């Protein structure tokens, strides 16, 4: 971005790929529940706006099926972005159609335009190079230069991430640069002891990262829904808790390979059903009743995890420890997050749900070394995969 600003952008049309895929309130789907991803891209947008660029912002939201779907409109995001920028944002009702082309052509220097959801076009996510390329041609025609500041989407081989930069002079935004610097440090030269905390619902989603991290970490703490498949592999009955039966053998091999470095909860908060009002109790992992399901790690587990975290010089955390959105099951995530904020070392919160948990639970963000905006992207970076969006910027 500094290179682009150095070239002078006044009057130039700059296409900024952002990740404005924000969560909405479950009870009111028009209310953004966490605007962290919008805030994260503000420095790039402000720098371009203040330098007199005509700023064309594009993002995906959710996973619509390649056609317009009002449930996934970016209109509320345009409003919030305007509030945060302190200047109104022009909103185009399509991405490359009449509304977008007219709005892009009419933009004044220093104005910001947000296009409608990129994924309303089948070409954005198509696996067919020609179909993606045709859509990328249309996107590229809107602008003179391309900035990728959508770290959360760099692992997607999508038109706006992978194909547009091949068609325009391309630059990394400040957010992408910062995210990559931090993840490179954690991946290549983590100061030891290195403790990784993983949560979230599925082992299968995290398998690749567990395999990549196991040789590097001193401790891998596992909570969230995924811990139950590990507990089952240790021989415990897990009642109605989340279980990936086909992963039990894999978890058993990982536990054997880890030789004590994978740490599992010793107690859980179990409830009769998935509800904030359900009867719930703390039980040891050997005593989970057949009629109950575990929805959070218990207090002894929090203490055990906090002790391991307290020894660390580097912590990477991805995935909540429980159903933190429901108050009775938030203590595990809160306890682990607070322990991470206290370490005498460098911590990274890896993305999506965990970053939202930090903000939703009101935990002091300044206690973390870095809060990533990319969940899937940061995990794939840690796995050592080539990320299409970064490869496109480097070519
Ligand atoms: C995310 O939320 O991780 C990013 O915005 C990417 O979204 P996707 O998984 O729908 O591609």
Image (spheres, rainbow, N blue to C red):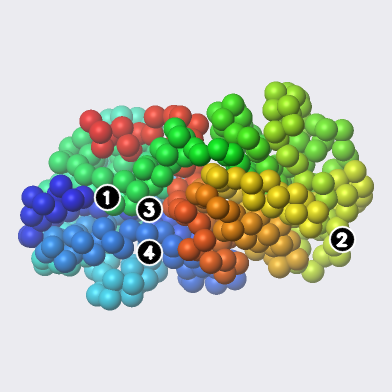
Residue 139 visible within the image: no
Return the x and y of residue 197 as percentages of the image width and height: 62, 45
Asked if residue 307 is positioned above or below residue 209 in the image, the reply reads below
How much space separates mark 3 and mark 1, taking CA atoms? Answer: 12 Å
| Mark-to-mark CA distance, 1 and 2 | 47 Å
Q: Is residue 261 left or right of residue 25?
A: right
- Ligand 1 within 8 Å of disc 3? The answer is yes
Callout 1: helix, strand or loop? loop
**Do the residues bearing badges 3 and 1 touch, measured as CB atoms within 8 Å?**
no
Which numbered circle lies on residue 184?
A: none
- Name the disc covering residue 173, or none: 1
- Please indicate whether residue 131 sits to the left or right of residue 22 in the image: left
Q: Is residue 233 above or below residue 58?
A: above
Q: Are marks 3 and 4 in contact (CB under 8 Å)?
A: no
Residue 137 lies left or right of residue 159; in this view the side is left
Q: Label 4: few (<14), some or many (≥20) within 10 Å?
A: some
Task: Judge depth for marks 3 and 1 and give the one in front.
Answer: 1
Q: Which residue is mark 2?
A: 281
Res. 376 in view:
yes
Alpha carbon distance from label 3 to label 4: 11 Å
Nearer to us: label 2 or label 3: 2
Residue at x 64%, y 46% (from the top left corner) = 311
Across and down, in percent, residue 329 comes to 73, 61
How packed is label 3: few (under 14 Cα within 10 Å), some, or many (20 or more)?
many
Query: Dot 1, how many residues are within 10 Å of its Cα: few (below 14), some (14-19), or many (20+)?
Result: many
Return the disc, 4 or 2, that comes first in the chain's sequence: 4
Which residue is at a point 39% across and 69% down the rendered structure image?
76
């Amino acid at each position: 971005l500094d290179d682009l600003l150095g070239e002078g952008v006044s009057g130039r049309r700059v296409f900024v790929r952002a990740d404005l895929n924000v969560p909405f309130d479950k009870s009111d789907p028009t209310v953004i529940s966490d605007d962290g991803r919008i805030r994260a891209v503000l420095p790039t947008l402000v720098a371009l706006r203040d330098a007199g660029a005509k700023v064309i912002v594009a993002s995906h939201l959710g996973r619509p099926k390649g056609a317009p779907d009002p449930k996934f409109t970016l209109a509320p995001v345009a409003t919030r972005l305007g509030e945060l920028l302190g200047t109104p944002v022009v909103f185009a009702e399509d991405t490359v159609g009449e509304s977008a082309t007219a709005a892009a052509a009419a933009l004044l220097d220093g104005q910001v335009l947000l296009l409608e959801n990129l994924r309303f076009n089948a070409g954005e996510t198509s696996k067919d190079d020609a179909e993606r390329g045709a859509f990328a041609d249309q996107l590229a025609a809107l602008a003179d230069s391309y900035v990728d500041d959508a770290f959360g989407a760099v692992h997607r081989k999508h038109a706006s991430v992978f194909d547009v930069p091949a068609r325009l002079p391309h630059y990394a935004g400040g957010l992408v640069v910062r995210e990559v610097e931090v993840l490179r440090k954690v991946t290549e030269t983590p100061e030891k002891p290195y403790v990784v905390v993983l949560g979230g619902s599925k082992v299968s989603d995290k398998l690749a990262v567990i395999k990549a991290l196991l040789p590097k970490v001193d401790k891998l703490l596992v909570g969230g829904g995924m811990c139950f498949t590990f507990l089952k592999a240790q021989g415990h009955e897990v009642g109605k808790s989340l279980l990936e039966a086909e992963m039990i053998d894999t978890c058993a091999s990982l536990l054997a390979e880890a030789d004590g470095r994978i740490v599992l909860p010793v107690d859980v908060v179990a409830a009769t059903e998935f509800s904030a009002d359900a009867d719930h109790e703390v039980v040891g992992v050997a005593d989970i009743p057949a009629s109950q399901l575990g929805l959070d790690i218990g207090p002894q587990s929090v203490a055990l995890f906090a002790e391991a975290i307290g020894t660390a010089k580097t912590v990477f955390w991805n995935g909540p420890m429980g159903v933190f959105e429901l108050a009775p099951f938030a203590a595990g995530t809160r306890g682990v997050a607070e322990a991470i904020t206290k370490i005498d070392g460098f911590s990274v919160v890896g993305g999506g749900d965990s970053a939202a948990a930090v903000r939703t639970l009101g935990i002091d963000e300044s206690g973390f070394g870095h809060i990533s905006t990319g969940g899937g992207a940061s995990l794939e970076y840690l796995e050592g995969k080539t990320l299409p969006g970064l490869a496109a910027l480097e070519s």
